[in-house]
Amino acid sequence: MKVLVPVKRVVDANVQVRVASDHSGVDLNNVKMAINPFCEIAVEEAIRLREKGVATEVVVVSAGAKVCQEQLRTALALGADRAILVETDEELQPLAIAKLLKAVSDKEGAELTIFGKQSIDEDNGQTGQMFAALAGLAQGTFASEITIEGDKLKVIRETDTGEQTLTLNMPAVITADLRLNEPRYASLPNIMKAKKKPMDVMTPADLGVEVTTNIKTLKVEPPAERAAGIIVETVEDLVDKLKNVAKVI
Amino acid sequence: MSVLVLAEHDNNELKSATLNTVTAATEIGGDVTILVAGSGCGAVAEQAAKIAGVAKVLVADNAAYTNMLAENTAALIVELAGDYSAILAPAMTNAKGILPRVAALLDVGQISEITAVVSADTFVRPIYAGNAMATVQSSDSIKVITVRGTGFDAPSAEGGSATVEAISNATDAGVSEFVSEEVAASDRPDLTAARVVISGGRGMQNGENFKLLEAVADKLGAAIGASRAAVDAGYVANDMQVGQTGKIVAPELYIAVGISGAIQHLAGMKDSKVIVAINKDEEAPIFQVADFGLVADLFEAVPAFEALL
């Protein structure tokens, strides 16, 4: 079974982002970039499936500028077998990415595609579901556990009220939540080995996909600041403030 | 043109975030129609019809929609989509799975978790875990949007008299099947709808100590939440997580106990009206967003706080 894992290059989770002074977006100059943490969990899950003998090959794919090769190399160092970059400098929105991935998936014939549930930059949480819809496949979003049972996939999902278990026909699409696994660190020998693993580069035109943008960002602003609060000295003082100043209890 | 709102419900009860979504729909403009997809969900349709400002309720009552499986529900909405200029749903687990599918099948973009409506095609939404707010404009003929409930006031749940119409044809895509559900049983209010929320973090040390918070919650009628650290450590269940990847809450009073205030937690609660932080580390970032901070050992402060309520 071949597993396809899309990965996204995003601002590192530990970076405190700043809105650019012209309000066109956030300032990305000299900012550390990384694999989106949820995509990293997806890569880890695919590698574990291969280690268990369930999957035979793990293919990672990214869409974007040439620099996305860095994140694909990281995924290869974690243990993915080969990588595909759909290279374009155009702005990519979830629908366009889903179409590109669908075209890649048609070529690859993967039986399972594991996405991260959302990227920590745009926080859209759409691409996996859009891909599943375009491919006509079942989806298991916000997965915290997956098991392959014959030609079905059992998925436990994190929901607003607890947990839900579904079975999906294969091929299927999964989006990984935080507690699906804890990703490993890449070892130095594996980082060296990753440099020699194959990476195919293609363009949206090669895949016959026209990249369109439906949603235009007009401006980006910092969030409203909260007024500075006060430190109270005692529990009595706290209760008094909540009763008589804030009037919330 | 009118706006379609997908109801969030459990076949018995309409979830309150649906009401906030109706407000967003009203701000976009046009008649508001609510779609209730479920099975044995007649009571939900009745509740939806009473919401002030709703013109029509469509009820797809069929076994195919019992658990609002994304594949089936998205196909249903796509069939109805032609009559609407916008399709909205509360940004909860169900719609987050369904609406991107709807958008892809309609070949339009989707806009996630809006917090404000600027005009019929322009919306505000948080990006980078709420560290920036983007104003975005859609050029699509049908806008497909999930709505963050905390951004919109709820209309009156009573007084409306929408017509109720049944949809008889149903599609079961047959690719996914519901097996089971584990719902955390609780008599407390819903985290996302509660007037008061008290949350515990890693400082609670174990799940047993959350009893301290329960005592306070009993007196204040509060819901109980947790930080990701507390959930990851296994103290409490995942559905209690407040934060970027958990629930987004904006109660009148939020009490953070033993929570340091990681960015991803702040993203889930910083729109609360009044924030209280109790933490023994005076350097904890939670104090930067707190209206009232108390630097103290929670194991002494929380019982003392409860005794005074």
Image: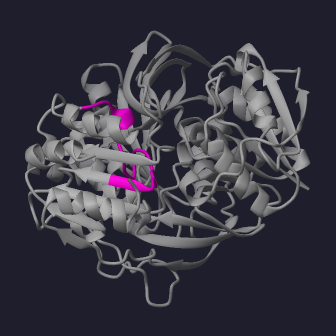
Q: Is residue B80 magenta?
A: no
Residue B8 showing in the rendered view: yes
Residue in the picture at 27% in, 61% down? A240
The chief SS type of the magenta part is: loop
x and y percentages locating residue A86 in the rendered image: 50, 57
Count of numbered circles on the image: 0
x and y percentages locating residue B91 in the rendered image: 57, 46
Quarter-wise, where is residue B59 in the image? top right
Q: Is residue B237 magenta?
A: yes
x and y percentages locating residue B251 in the rendered image: 45, 53
Residue in the picture at 21% in, 52% down? B259
Q: Residue furthest top?
A: A150
Residue A147, relative to residue B68: is it above or below? above
Stretch of the chain drawn in magenta: B236-254
Residue in the picture at 47% in, 29% down? A112
Task: Say which of B174 and B196 sits in front.
Answer: B196
Residue in the picture at 58% in, 51% down? B149
x and y percentages locating residue A238 in the rendered image: 23, 60
Q: Quadrant of the N terminus of chain A?
A: top left
Q: How is the image coloured?
A: one colour
Quarter-wise, where is residue B280 in the image? bottom left
Quarter-wise, where is residue B128 in the image? bottom left
Task: Say which of B91 and A146 sits in front.
Answer: B91
Task: Say which of A116 and B35 sits in front.
Answer: B35
Say left or right for B28 vs B115.
right
Say left or right for A11 vs B17.
left
